[in-house]
Each structure stands twice: as structure tokens, then as C-alpha cells.
Image: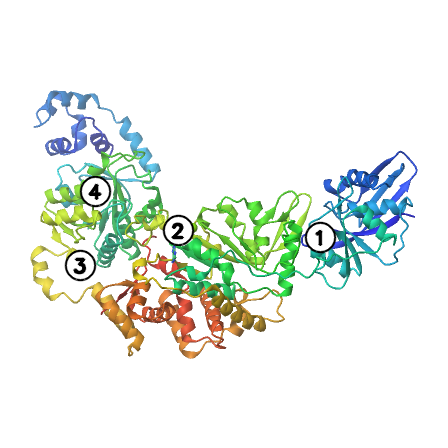
Amino acid sequence: MASIVNSFAITGVEAYLVDVEVKAIPGQPMISIVGLGDTAVKEARERVEAAINDSRYTFPQKKVVINLAPSDLKKSGSHFDLSIAIGILIETGQLALKKEEKFGIIGELSLNSRLRACSGILPMVIAARNAGVKNIIVPRDNLREASLVAGLQVYGFESLKDVAEFLEDKKPYQADAKNAEFIGSVVMDGVDFCDVQGQDGLIEYIVVAAAGGHNLLMIGSPGCGKSMIAKRIPTILPSMTEEEALEVTKIYSVAGILKEKGGLIRNRPFRSPHHNASTNSLIGGGKDATPGEISLAHNGVLFLDEIAEFGKNTLESLRQPMEDQRVTISRVRYTNTYPASFMLVAAMNPCTCGYFGTDRCKCTDYEVMKYRQKISGPIMDRMDIQKYVRPVDFMDLSNDYKGATSESLRQRVEAARKIQQKRFAGIQGINCNSQMGNQLIKEHCILEDDGKKLLMLAYERYQYSARAYHKYLKVARTFADMEASAKIRKKDVALAIMARDLEKDRAGMTVL
Amino acid sequence: MEYWIWLSGLRGIGPIAQKKLLEYFKTPNRIYESSEEELVTVPGIGSSLAQSICEARSLDGAFSVLEELNQKKMKVLAYDDPLYPDLAKEWPEAPVVLYYMGTIRKSCVGQGIVGSRRCSAYGKQVAVEAAGYLAQKDIPVISGLAKGIDGYAHTACLKAGGYTIAFLGNGLDVYYPREHRELQASIIENGAVVSMYLPGTKPRPEHFPKRNGLISSWSRKLLVAEAANKSGALITAQLAKTLGREIFVPPHEIYRVSGQGTNQLLKNGATLYLKPEQLDCRDFLKEQFLSETNETTGPVANSRSKRKQNRTERKLTADEAKIQAVLISSEKNIQQIEALTGISQVCLIERLSIMELEGVVALSSCGCYKFLDC
Ligand SMILES: Nc1ncnc2c1ncn2[C@@H]1O[C@H](COP(=O)(O)OP(=O)(O)O)[C@@H](O)[C@H]1O
Ligand SMILES: [Mg+2]
């Protein structure tokens, strides 16, 4: 009978239970791993052999066959090392298993038998819990991450020997004192919205965007403060729910970039890829189909500065994920699906020369339109809020001018988010106003009479499409939420109508 | 037609000499068939010219041009064509053959609108308003398809359902500037694109003065919307002046480089342009007579009064009255309004949004609000 140890494999941000079966049979000494493992899995045999010998166990002089079941699913990663090594020790009688419970075993081995941290711990531990595995062994460096999952016993070790002796009941487990619950705190690198002067009007729209999860485009001449404002957006984002935080942490875990040795990510991510980023790095890919920036921005903000400079195809690739709120990446070896529900914040110049709207600009209307068409219609269409950033004339400002602080703005955002959470409780995939479909809009965007009148006036004047009409309603909904108003008032409509400067601009252009 | 093309293509003989020949022989095929001795008797034709005309006696070139024109759906407007406007013939250098696409209609002389390629929002506004006005009056808008003012004039005319003619300094199948390719196509639908150059001719600097001559000669009046000191529009104006056409020029700020050429035109006696009605097509006396009484009619005034009707009549709130008070003197941006009224930006946006919808204020492309007094 073969010896069986439990481990896990990852697909996308989910994991599933894998039986690591080990059988030693008489024959030419060799080790072969079957069950659709990738190179990292196959190379486990070298690491395992070195680690076993290093721990003063002996590697069997037999033919060793290892099967990773279910054998018809592709598996990747180096985290099978430890389970394979333990399996071999059990199979060759060098380890007499004393524990009776089922153990899940995860860890990469170094050549001198130390345990190395792996990526994807969080989804694997969640899979363990869901599969009814009550105990799990991980490298010590992954202990904090694994401990994020409640409902099972997590053990962290430093070497193969430690694990073996623990399983043989030779040595009791010593909990790490350092492993106190990690409290994630909101630390921002010292930037605050009160640094931005004279832009209160614009900032109100930024706050609304953050509160309602509306995509935001800022257009303005170089130096007018677009990047400065965008950098401050993380300081006003609402905190994440436990569930959201876990989703984000899972993605970072799989991507192998979980910082602070695997604490729960509590701040909403803010990702700002450079404009020469490749399509792969943006939406995900590479040979292992790893998550890209849009997934790393899940539940947070994806900031594309100088969006007009991004490759056309790169931008176009954002379309589907924005629609679906997730992305599917197919590679020859894998097809992975990652969540990608983010708020898109973008900044761009208004025209080629950058000074449209001032005397300095000599671009023709055609050139201006061409420049803006670098962002395709469907992407532009998803920008609920499109605001001009006008340069501030500092002569107009008194010296002691101070805008609202990020903290006060964040509290307003938080309050508006609470209302939305209540509104959308129980509706799968909808967390904020920007995600409302037509049905929800109809249900939740009730206008007061004079608000309706004003919107009709705008509708006639600017010849809105039905789509645009819905956009304004969603933004107006968020304005109303900012003041906890159940119905949308005239005031909210008035402000929402001013949310799309570019649309108005187009009407003033003399082009065919 | 082949004889016309042959005549226009003769080397060393410009349009002036070509027309002398026409005057003498009446038709181009008679020129083609005449002997060297007969040719020398035409005033202005020396013996060497006469000799070269005789040597060039072959229609092969003309036929292949005709075939190419046919293929490319281009048409020929010869000097004796009834559609060739008499007004345009006042220009001594008027070409004996023009190539065009689209339709040359019976009354196709119109008003020219020209100006800088790189123009200001002001220049653009002048051109757009004038072209829209002319379109409503069904007066052709003549221009040169260049970037900037020219393009705006054609576009605004087409948008208002008008008829417009564009003169090119290159062959009709060469798209210059590239960005006006679509514009060129729609001019062909609703007007004509005209050139004296054969298909395939590249735009060259020396072509443009002649193109400008065509614009001037096909226009009764010429509006120079905006021109800096060495702008090509000034050449058009110069030619128009020699042809005795009235030149209209809007005033420009004296410190701004972009309007220095036009201001110079004003100083040199161009007519001060203040409203599109000045471009109406009536004869001189009538215009004098009507100009006073007609003040309040016309489409522009009409649209203003329409806006007035649209405007919701109601009492302004206290904040709105404050806003109105600071906007009456000049347009201002939101920060300036905030500084002057002490009303917070968010409240201002809310108010201005409503006031804009009600037609009390308007937002310009630079982000300034202005008060609309009706
Ligand atoms: N409203 C403002 N208040 C304070 N500083 C500003 C403001 N606008 C611009 N600045 C200053 O100008 C600099 C350039 O702004 P930046 O955000 O880089 O402009 P952009 O990204 O629009 O080109 C900022 O770092 C900041 O110092
Ligand atoms: Mg910037």
C-alpha cells in the first residue's frame, strides 16, 4: 500500500486538496513524479533528496513513484516538496506516524532541509478548511498568513526534521510567541488632501468617486496637479470588509508578493502601473498565467497616469475585465481566472500640446478629438466622472488656505459606503453605486420632483442617450448618499450634471 | 476638352498669355491647329514661344490626363464653361482649366473665409459664426481646406447645411492636410473641391499663392478671421484687395501675436467686421440702406431671442444674485468666483450647473463662466 499525505494545488485564486501518494518499489534507484506537475514540481525530487540526506535520513535505494492525485489536473509550484519528503519517510519506515488526525502539509525545501515560504498559502489553507482538514503544517514564515483562516489548527516549522519529529510525537509543538494577531494600520506616506489648494470643487468629485466606486478621469494641463491629487486618493478610500480583505490577500498570496510576512491586507490596494507596462503585466499572464495589475488592484484603485500614452491594445484589454469584474487568462499550460473589480482612476492631458483651453494651445479641434480618441469610446464610456483640473492661480489664494483633511473626507466616504452596503446587502457582486445595473438604478434612484425637472432640462439641452442618463443618475445617487438623503434632490442632480466635462466639450467642437 | 487640357499644360506659357491666345483664336483647338506664323501675330507671343507651342503639338498627354480624371471621377471646368464665374475671371491669372470634384452650382461665388492654421479660440469663433450664418443664407463659403480657420469655416458651413467650395494647392487625390480627408469627402457631397493642379500633384509652397488667388477671385467679400504677421491669409487679402473685393477683419487684441496681421489689415483700410450680417450678399446701395433697419433680425439675433424664451423666468436666489454680480463685468473661473463671493466651490458648482441649464450663464472652453445678457 502506498503512503498518502495531503497537500494542495492552486488554480487562479482558489486551491484544492491533493493526495500525494508515495510508493517505493524494488528496482533501479530513481524517483518519478506523475500527475501533471510543472517544472517546479518535477524539480522537487532533487531538493527532496538533498533535504532527506541532510536531515540524516536515508533516501531509499529503490524506485520511488509519486502521484499527485487527482492526476488529470495541472499542478504547479514548489510547495509540494515537504509533503513528498514526509511521504517518502513514511513509506520507507523512517517516520512512524503517531498523530491520528489528518494533516495538510505545505512547504518548499532548501537543499539543507530548511523550510522556505511559499506563495498561495492563504487559498490553500482555505481549501484545507473547506475539505475538512483540521490541521495544517506550513513553513514558519507563512504562519501568519495561514493563521488568517479561522477554524483549523496551524503549525509552523523551520526544517524537515522539526516536522518529522512533531509527527512522531517526539517533540511537542512550540507556538511562536511573535505570532500575535497582526493589526493592519492605515499608514500613508505622509500625503494628505489638505496639501491640495484651491481645488475644493474638484476634490468633492474625487470624494464622490471614492464613495460610489465611480471610475474617474482627470484632464488637465501638465503641472495642474493631476498626479498630486491621484496620489492622495488612497488616503480617502473606505476600509475593506473582512471578506474583501481576504479576497485581496488571496490574490497577493498567489502572486507571491504578500508583504509583512503575510498579514491580512487591510488597506485597499492602489496600483499605478507605468504607461509602458506590457499588456501581460497589466491584465495578467506570463508562462504561469499570474495575476496582473488589474487583479492586484482588486477592491481598490487602478491608477493610469498619462492614460493616453498607454498602448491602444493594452487599454483595449481592460475592457472585458472592467465589464466582468474578473479576468480570465489562458496560456498553453493554464487557464486562470482572477477577480478584477477595481475603481479606475486615470489622468491625461487635454490635447497633444497639453494646454487646451488656454491661449497657449493652438491645436485644431480635429487634433484635440484625435488625441482624446486614443482612449476608446467604450473605456471613456465607463468613466462616470470626467473632470477638468484647472490650474490654480496661487495669487487668488490666501496664504493660510487649507482644504479639508483626508481624514475628514475619508469619514464622509465611509459613511456613504455604509449606506451603500446596506442598500446592496445580499446582492452578489454589488458593493457600491457604480456597479448598479438598470434594474437597480430604477429601484434605488428615486428623484424628487424638482430634481427630475432639472434632469429633464439637461436631457433636452444636451440630448443625452439613455446610457448617459443612467450615468448621471448613479453619480447623483452617490451625491445624495454623501448627505444620507434617501431621495435624489435637485442639488444632487445639479452636481451630477457637472460630472462629465468632456461630454460637454464635445458639443463645442467644430468637427464633422 | 483635350484641347483645353493641352492649352493649360503648355510649358512656358502662363494663364495670361493663354488667355491672349484664346482671345485671338476663340477656341483652344484653333490654337492647336494654327501655324507658327499665325501664332507670332498674337500680341505678347514671341517667335520662341510660338515655336515651342508648335513643337508641343500632341494630344497624347491631354488624353491620358482625361482618362485619369475619368477614372478618379474628377471633372473639368474650362474657361468657356457657363459655370466658370465671371467674377472669378476678373483675376488676370485665372487658370483656363480647373479640376474639381463635387458640384459647381450656378451661383457659386460666395464669401471667402480665411485665416491662420494655428488659430485662437477667438479666431475660430469668428469663422464658425460667419460660416454658419452664410450657410443659413445659402451663400457659398469659399476657403482653402487648410487646418485651423479654413477647416472650421468649411465644417461649420456643412454642419449648418450650407454649400462650400475648397481650393487646394495640390492634386485632388492628394490629401493635404491628412486630417481633412473626411472633411474633403463631405465637401464633395455638399459643394466642390477645386484645384488647378493635375491629380497626383504634391502640395508645394509655390502653389499656395495661386490657390489663394483662386479663393480671392471666387469671393465677393473676404473675411480674414485671424492672421499673424506673415500668415498666408495676408496674401489672400492682398490679392482680394487688388481685385477690389471688400475685406472684413474682426478686431484683435493689440498685444497678441496671433492677431497682428489682421490688425495691420484694419490699419490699412480693411472693413471692421463686427457681425456676420456684414457678409450678406446685397448690392452696395441696398446694403447701406438696409443696414440700419435690419439690425434686429437675422438668424443670430433670432437664436438669441430663442434662448431668451428658453430661459426659465424666476427670481434669482441670493447666492445666484451674488454670482451674477461678479460675472457681469467679465467672465471668471470658479476659483475667482469663490474668492469674490465667498461661496464655497461645491455650492457654486451646484448653482452654476442650474444657471447654465437655464441659460443664465455659459461655460467657455477655458473653464470660465460668463453671464449671458439677452
Ligand atoms: N492645487 C494645488 N495645490 C498645491 N500644489 C499644487 C497644486 N496644483 C499643482 N501643485 C504643484 O504642482 C506640482 C505638479 O503637479 P502634478 O500633480 O505633477 O501635475 P500633473 O500630474 O497634472 O502634471 C505638484 O507636485 C504640486 O507641488
Ligand atoms: Mg502627472
Badge 3 and badge 4 both on one subunit: yes
Q: On the image, which quarter does residue A137 sit in?
A: bottom right
Where is residue A133 shown, x and y percent of the image?
80, 59
> Which residue, given by chain and number where applicable, does mark 3 sit on?
B275
Badge 1 density bin: few <14, some 14–19, many ≥20, Cα 10 Å: many
Dot 2 or dot 1: first in sequence order is 1
Q: Output the chain of dot 1.
A: A
Specify the label residue A349 is tagged with: 2
Residue at mark 2: chain: A
Tell me the distance, in whole angstroms, between the alpha carbons under discs 4 and 1.
Answer: 72 Å
* Residue annotated with mark 1: A142
Depth check, mark 2 against mark 3: the one in front is 2
The amino acid marked with disc number 4 is Ser
Seen in the picture, residue B141 relative to B323 is either above or below; the reply is: above
Separation of disc 1 and disc 3 at Cα?
A: 78 Å
Mark 2–mark 3 distance (CA, rounded to whole Å): 34 Å
User: Which residue is label 4 attached to?
Assistant: B231
Task: Tell which subunit mark 4 falls on.
Answer: B
Labels 1 and 3 touching (C-beta < 8 A):
no
